Image (cartoon, rainbow, N blue to C red):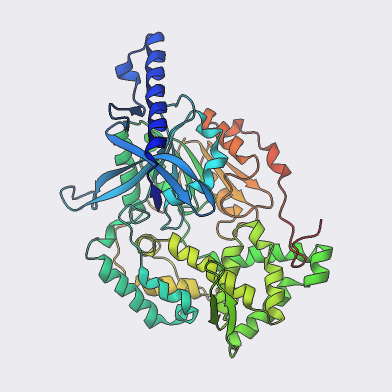
Amino acid sequence: MTTARLSSGRRVTFRSRLVAASLLAACALALAGCDSAQQDTGPRADANGDLRYGAITFKPCALSQRRIAAVEAQCATFSVPENHDAPNGRKIELALALIPATGQATPDPIVFLAGGPGQSILEAYPHLHAGLRDARRNRNVLLIDARGTGKSHPLRCTEMDRLQDAPALWRDREAIRGIAASCRDRLSKTSDLRFYGTGDHIRDLDAVRAALGVERFNLVGISYGTRVAQQFAARYPTRTRTVTLDSIAPNTLVLGQEHARNLDEALKRQFARCTADTACKRNLGDPAATLATVRERLQAGGLAPVRYRDSKTGDWREETPSFGHLSGLLRLYAYQPASASMLPLLLRDAEQGRYEPLLAQANAIGGDMNEAIMMGMHLSVSCTEDTEIHVDPKDADTVMGTDLVDFLKTMCEVWPKGERDANFRKPLSGDVPVLAISGEFDPVTPPRYGDEVVKTLPKGRHLVLPGQGHSVLTVGCMPKLFARFMETADTKSVDDACLKRLKPTPPFAGNYGWEP
C-alpha cells in the first residue's frame, strides 16, 4: 500500500473543513432540538483537528495508485487478536481508511471488501473512487485491509517472485512445494498462518464496527470480497443493512476449481466477436484457430530466446517464449473488455513469429499481480476453505489446463490449515437486501454465479452488464444504480434500463485498433 501524509498546509485545510462540518452538524442538531449525546455518533474532529470516529482516531492521508489521482482520506490502525478465541495472545494491526461523505452522512457507512484473496482494499480503492461520487454524498466510505494484506500484517511470499522469471516452475511440483515451505517457515516466525481466513476477517470487521459505534454496515464485495460479504451477512444479519456483490463467488464455489472452464468459455465468446466482425476476421483470421497453432508451437518448445523491451523500465530483456506466458496473459487480459479486444492481434503476432508483444505484456501484468496479491494470505484462505479442490481430467484440454489446481493443491500440502465454519458452504439466505451484479463476459465469475446466489434471497436481485468483464460497479450508469440502492435498500426500486446502452469493446482489427 502506498499511503502518504498530506503536506502540512493541505492538512490544515482539510482539518479546518472537518472542524467546520462538526460545528455545522452540532448546530443542526441544536436547531432540531435533538439530544446530541444520542445522535452525534459519526466522525467528528477532535481538539487536535484529527478525526475521531467512535473509539478510533483517524489522521489525514492519501490513498495512491499508479496512473490514478490520489484520494484524500483519513487513515488509522486498529489492534485485534490474531486469534480471536485467545484475546490475550498476539495482537496484529489492521490498516483502516475513511473517505468522509461529501454531505451530511447517515450513520451506516459503505464498507468495501477486496478481491484476491490477498488484495489490499486501500490499494485498490483509488480505481473505484471517481465512480462513487453519488453514493458518497451522504455516506462515509470505510476501508479495512483484510488481515494478511496491504499494511494489515501483510503475508507476502517473496519466494513466489521466482515464478515470474521461470514460468516452467509452475509445473515443477517439488519446486512449488519448496517455495511454499520456505514462505511458510519465514512467515511463521511472526504469524500463526491458521488465522488469516475469511472467518477471521469477518470477526475483524465486526470488531471495527463495534469500535466505531456503528450499528450496521453496507457491504460491497468485489470478487473474493463477495464471499466475505456473504459470510458476514450470514453471521451478523442484524449488523448488515445491505449487501452489494460485484462479480459473485457463491458460498458453494470452490475457488479455483472452475477457472479453467470459465476462461475457455469467455475466450470462445470473445473470439466469436472477432469472426463476426468483418475487419477483424479479414485481417486477423479466426483467433480460436490461431490460438491452437500458437499453443502447439509453444508447448513443443525449442524456440530461440527473444529480445524485448521491459514495458515498465524500458530495459532490454531476453527470454524464451513459453505457453506459460501465453496462458497467463490470456487469463488476465480476459478480465476486461478493453484488454480482451487486443487478444486476436497478440495471437496473430505470435503466429507470425513476433513474440515481443506477448513477452512484454505477459511480464508486465504478471509483475503487477505479484505486487497486488499477498500469496501468504491467499494460501491461508484457500488451503482452509477450499479443500474440495481437485484435478478434473476434463480441464486438460483447456487453455489453463490443470496447472492452477495442481499449483494450489501442491502448495496446500505444506501450508497450515485453520478451521472452516460448519455452515461455510451454506448459501446466503434471509431478508437482507442483496444487489448482485455481473459482467456478461466475466471469465472468472460468470453471470450464472449471480443467478445462483439470488435464488435463496427474497430481497435479492441480479443485474448483468452487457459486454462487460470482471468488476463492474463503476461501469456506465451502474454508479447511479448503486447510489439508488444505498438510498432505498430496495433492489426493486433500481431501474436498470440504462444498462441496456452498454456495448462490448470492438475487437482490434490491426495495430491501429478497431475500425470505426
Residue 406 location, x and y as percent?
A: 45, 75
Residue at position x 71%, y 72% in the image: 288
Q: Position of 356 compared to 259: left or right?
A: right
Q: Position of 333 compared to 407: left or right?
A: right
Numbered-mark total: 0
Residue 166 location, x and y as percent?
A: 47, 80
* Of the pair 82 and 464, the residue shown nearer to us: 82
Relative to 43, say whether 461 is above or below.
Answer: below
Of all residues, the one furthest to the front in this rendering is 9
Relative to 222, say whether 498 is above or below.
Answer: above
* Of the pair 235 and 163, the residue shown nearer to us: 163
* Of the pair 426 and 51, the residue shown nearer to us: 51
**Image quadrant where one finds the C terminus:** bottom right
Q: Position of 57 compared to 491: left or right?
A: left
* Residue 350 lies in quadrant: bottom right
* Residue 501 lies in quadrant: top right
Is residue 394 in sight in this rendering?
A: no
Residue 52 location, x and y as percent?
A: 31, 31
Residue at position x 31%, y 51% in the image: 200
Residue 4 location, x and y as percent?
A: 39, 47
Is residue 300 in sight in this rendering?
A: yes
Of all residues, the one furthest to the left in this rendering is 88
Relative to 475, say whether 218 is above or below.
Answer: above
